[in-house]
Amino acid sequence: MISSLGYLRIESADVAAWREFGVRVLGMTEGRGPRGEGGPGGDLPPEERATYLRMDDFPARLVIVPGAQERLLASGWEVRDGAALAAVARALSEAGVPFKVGSGDELAARRVSELLVLDDPAGNTLELFCGAALEHRPAVSSYGNRFVTGSMGMGHVVLPVPPGSTAAFDFYTEVLGFRLRDSMRMPAELFGLPAGSPPIWFRFLGCNPRHHSLALAPMPSPQGIIHLMVEVATLDDVGRTLDRCTKRGAPVSASLGRHANDQMVSFYVRTPGGFDIEYGTDGLMVDDATWICRESTAVSLWGHSFADPAH
Ligand SMILES: [Fe+2]
């Protein structure tokens, strides 16, 4: 039912730092606000003072809304059309999951034609939408990098869930139709649970050929997000971005490496919001007709040394 990860809405007390980071480090393009103004402005409502970061013809893939906290407000998930969104609404109702229909102001702020807002069983806010109004001014990166988006969406997001509960996994797979692509297990003792408890599972879920668009990580996150992955077309795009992190003092939280499950060659950088962005290339695409779910027993084939070993 879900087509792809469409956007993230992030609250930040330092929108200017995010703008600089998004444009000068990540190589994204600054977009305009819903009224075409954008940028700072004291009396404007938060939507108009937000920073819009583009990767492609979406008006924004990252929306940084000014506020008091550093946190993920919502992950936006695109569905094909109004009929598909109506089917999602029916599935939510049948499963007893409460949701709100987006107001006119919410639709205008997001530049979408229909919107449902709900919390998953772990308390992560989701916005399910269709009918995004595209921006036809090309999103040309100053650094020449090209983001891999299209039908695979903006990348993947890793959301926190309580260790030992399968409620979120059941919701995403049984109600929203995500498909399990891969799992990783960790000993329960690492999560403060008594010795001998069943293992704790990380789940990697897909909704399009990207190996995973969503991962559920059984760990706490004050920001409500473990990391966002964005993909670029070439290894040179990744390497030049790594150089810009060094040049501009953006903290690299994991060295270059290749993940075992989605085979992404990537590094991780700490955002002004205190969580990581994984910046990668060469991610695995899968075909559900032939894909078989297995267990990965290593995070990476090589590299990915995390600065914080508790990561
Ligand atoms: Fe990732």
Image (cartoon, rainbow, N blue to C red):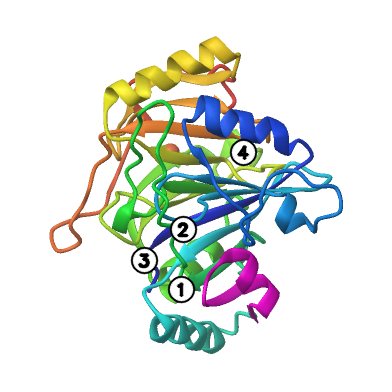
Q: Quadrant of the C terminus?
A: top right
The image shows residue 264, relative to residue 179, as above or below, that is above
Q: Amino acid at mark 3?
A: Ser
- In the image, 193 versus 177, the foreground residue is 177
Q: Which residue is mark 4?
A: 191
Residue 302 x, y percent position in the rendering: 31, 19
Q: Which residue is mark 1?
A: 130
Q: Which residue is mark 3?
A: 3
Q: Which residues are magenta?
A: 100-117
- The 10 Å Cα crowd at callout 4, few under 14, some 14 to 19, many 20 or more, is some
Q: Quadrant of the N terminus?
A: bottom left
Circle 4/circle 1 CB separation < 8 Å: no
| Front label number (4 vs 2) | 2
Circle 4/circle 3 CB separation < 8 Å: no
- In the image, 7 versus 47, the foreground residue is 47
Whichever of labels 2 and 1 marks the residue nearer the N terminus, that label is: 2
* Mark 4 Cβ and ligand 1 under 8 Å apart: no
The image shows residue 306, relative to residue 138, as above or below, that is above
Q: Amino acid at mark 2?
A: Gly
Magenta-drawn stretch contains 80: no
State the SS at label 2: strand
State the SS at label 1: strand
Q: Residue at x 58, y 14 (%)?
A: 248
For residue 6, the mark is 2
Q: Amino acid at mark 4?
A: Phe
Q: What is the spatial separation of the Cα atoms under label 2 and label 1, in whole angstroms?
A: 10 Å
Circle 4/circle 2 CB separation < 8 Å: no
Residue 140 x, y percent position in the rendering: 40, 38
Residue 93 x, y percent position in the rendering: 56, 87
- In the image, 156 versus 11, the foreground residue is 11
| Front label number (3 vs 1) | 1
